[in-house]
């Protein structure tokens, strides 16, 4: 996830671009840059690794005069944060400047093809191929050149481009990445999100997949995939800036929960070839996973819970011995890590102090290291032998939602890939099931009204218990953590079979017990435990797959997830738990995005 802003009109472009980027910094903040078409016809550029403040300092007193420009704030995917990898990007002759949000899946093939024709690349990004392809279409008007280029691209993109050969136009295109056009009086804007332009106009056009736009100072034109004009209706935005940053939602957390279907698409994009029955993870080549005798998944908090799901999948699918360790405990236990082991460090920020220390300890003992992180250029990203980015985009709310599910999906892909490396069968049906998760998550999140009503009924509970078996227990741990983090209700998760070893003494009439029951092999055992607590007056809320109609006979209420292969269920079964925690916190009047005593990144031991 990155932020794009563009302007054409009578005002100086640079101040508008920088202000817009600051409004979009929640979408990415590891590097930033601007390109302005100067009065002399040259494209003036400034870009810098770091935040927008670093870019402002870099520009200093330089004015970069011009009334047409584009800007970008980056969330790195291809290439680590650096001045060279910051956008905008150019081709060989500097004729075009391009900014991009998304992932070009076939960039390596295009880069090789362009290099063979003499193009010289200056960055590690996938985006730069677009600028070079535009050069090869320089005999065409700018909009038509961009349309021709997008036909070559596979993946997702929101693109904005300017050319020194067409000083009166700014063009843009969208495919599976957000892009809006702001319509002003004698000036036009383009941006990844409404907050970037809200100070200047409240009239916007929301581009749809396959559409492109050509902006001049006088008008904004939108075209369909076939080049015909699109009758796009203007939207009047009534939100204030802070509401706009949240997409009109009350909190970042609910916005990020609802972004998860798109995150699922980004995390899996280009990594699954269903037709060939392959999981493609070139990032882990050379790590020796196929020969690893033991895996160690090390993480803290929510990432640790994702690691528990990962352990179940790595052992169940790939059949490799896997240990999941809490980062803050790992290096103080004299861990059994040896040559031939691989340590997998999982962290949203890549800056979790205990997890970094564990990675270093594992390396000291001879293990190869793999980072699963959401932040390119972070400490884990730099120190690990290999990196699997989760591609969730920036997460603002302290309580993690989309970062957690992207970790689960990344570890799922790793388990499937490792199984293939070791000669295990991975069916096309299972791979197809992974590609269907975004649509199923969309359908599940559409039922959030039912969960909001349930949250209102349990919001005043003193204690809530979560139970499950196998991966359901791992998900239960995350569910109870979310509830504690933001609602401040005491919650406890335990393996369902452990109830009778003490916790059953706490079950009394009316206490909510949330029972996860998505695994057929363990279904009857879990139902027995549901019956145990129900007999003692507990209010049982079951979470199960849609086809399990009989589950309603053993619970007071049932929340159903779409039917899915059982190894994939954790990515869906956690969604109602996130919503339940969110709506319970709202009902209690809590500051959802900034829960008391907590911070987003834990950078101390």
Image (cartoon, rainbow, N blue to C red):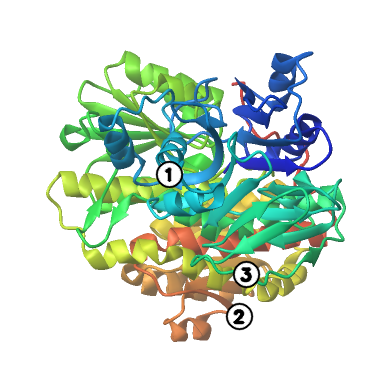
Residue shown at the point (78%, 65%) measured from the top left: 235
The x and y percentages for residue 13 are: 77, 34
Residue shown at the point (71%, 37%) measured from the top left: 68
Of labels 1 and 2, the one closer to you: 1
Residue receiving disc 1: 137
Disc 3/disc 2 C-alpha distance (Å): 50 Å
Counting residues from the N terminus, which is met first, the one under dot 3 or under dot 2? 3
Counting residues from the N terminus, which is met first, the one under dot 3 or under dot 1? 1
Picture layout, residue 411 above or below residue 368: below
The x and y percentages for residue 90 are: 50, 30
Residue shown at the point (30%, 27%) measured from the top left: 118
Residue shown at the point (50%, 49%) measured from the top left: 146
Counting residues from the N terminus, which is met first, the one under dot 1 or under dot 2? 1
Residue receiving disc 2: 556
Disc 1/disc 2 C-alpha distance (Å): 64 Å
The x and y percentages for residue 204 are: 76, 59
* Nearer to the camera, 591 or 122: 122
Which type of secondary structure does the marked residue at label 3 adopt? loop
Q: How many marks?
A: 3
């Amino acid at each position: 996830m990155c932020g794009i802003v563009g302007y054409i009109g009578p005002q100086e472009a640079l101040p508008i671009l920088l202000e817009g980027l600051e409004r979009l910094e929640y979408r990415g903040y590891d590097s930033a840059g601007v390109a302005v078409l100067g009065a002399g016809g040259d494209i003036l550029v400034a870009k810098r690794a770091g935040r927008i403040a670093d870019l402002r300092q870099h520009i200093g007193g330089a004015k970069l005069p011009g009334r047409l420009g584009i800007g970008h704030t980056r969330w790195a995917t291809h290439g680590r944060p650096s001045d060279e990898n910051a956008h905008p990007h150019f081709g060989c002759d500097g004729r075009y400047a391009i900014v991009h949000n998304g992932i070009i899946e076939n960039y390596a093939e295009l880069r090789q093809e362009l290099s063979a024709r003499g193009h010289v690349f200056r960055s590690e990004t996938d985006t730069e191929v677009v600028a070079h392809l535009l050069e090869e279409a320089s005999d065409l008007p700018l909009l038509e050149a961009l349309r021709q280029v997008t036909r070559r691209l596979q993946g997702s993109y929101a693109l904005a481009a300017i050319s020194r050969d067409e000083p009166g136009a700014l063009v843009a295109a969208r495919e599976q990445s957000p892009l809006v056009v702001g319509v002003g009086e004698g000036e036009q804007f383009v941006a990844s999100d409404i907050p970037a332009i809200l100070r200047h106009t409240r009239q916007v056009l929301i581009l749809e997949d396959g559409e492109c736009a050509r902006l001049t100072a006088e008008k904004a034109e939108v075209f369909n995939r076939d080049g015909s004009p699109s009758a796009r209706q203007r939207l009047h935005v009534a939100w204030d800036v802070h509401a706009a940053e949240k997409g009109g939602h009350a909190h970042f957390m609910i916005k990020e929960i609802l972004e998860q279907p798109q995150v699922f698409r980004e995390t899996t994009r280009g990594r699954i070839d269903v037709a060939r029955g392959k999981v493609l993870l070139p990032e882990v080549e050379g790590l020796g996973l196929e020969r690893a005798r033991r895996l160690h998944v090390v993480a803290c908090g929510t990432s640790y819970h994702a690691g528990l799901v990962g352990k179940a999948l790595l052992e169940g699918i790939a059949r490799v011995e896997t240990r999941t360790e809490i980062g803050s405990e790992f290096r103080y236990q004299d861990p059994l890590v040896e040559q031939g082991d691989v340590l997998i460090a999982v962290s949203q920020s890549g800056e979790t102090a205990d997890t970094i220390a564990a990675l270093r300890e594992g390396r000291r003992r001879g293990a190869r290291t793999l980072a699963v992180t959401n932040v390119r250029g972070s400490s884990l990203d730099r120190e690990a032998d290999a990196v699997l980015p989760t591609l969730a985009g920036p997460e603002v709310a302290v309580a993690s939602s989309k970062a957690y599910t992207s970790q689960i999906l990344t570890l799922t892909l790793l388990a499937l890939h490792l199984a293939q490396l070791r000669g295990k069968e991975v069916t096309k049906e299972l791979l197809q099931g992974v590609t269907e998760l975004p649509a199923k998550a969309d359908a599940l999140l559409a039922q959030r009204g039912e969960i909001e009503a349930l949250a209102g009924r349990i919001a005043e509970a003193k204690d809530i218990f979560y139970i499950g078996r196998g991966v359901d227990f791992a998900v239960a741990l995350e569910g109870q953590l979310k509830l504690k983090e933001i609602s401040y209700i005491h919650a406890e998760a335990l393996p369902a079979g452990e109830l009778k070893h003490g916790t059953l003494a706490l079950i009394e009439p009316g206490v909510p017990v949330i029972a996860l029951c998505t695994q057929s092999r363990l279904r009857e055992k879990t139902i027995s435990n549901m019956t145990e607590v129900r007999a003692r007056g507990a209010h049982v809320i079951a979470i199960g797959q849609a086809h399990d109609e009989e589950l309603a006979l053993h619970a007071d209420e049932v929340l159903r997830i779409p039917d899915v292969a059982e190894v994939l269920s954790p990515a869906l079964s956690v969604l109602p738990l996130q919503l339940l925690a969110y709506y319970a916190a709202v009902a209690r009047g809590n500051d959802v995005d900034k829960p008391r005593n907590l911070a987003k990144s834990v950078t101390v031991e």
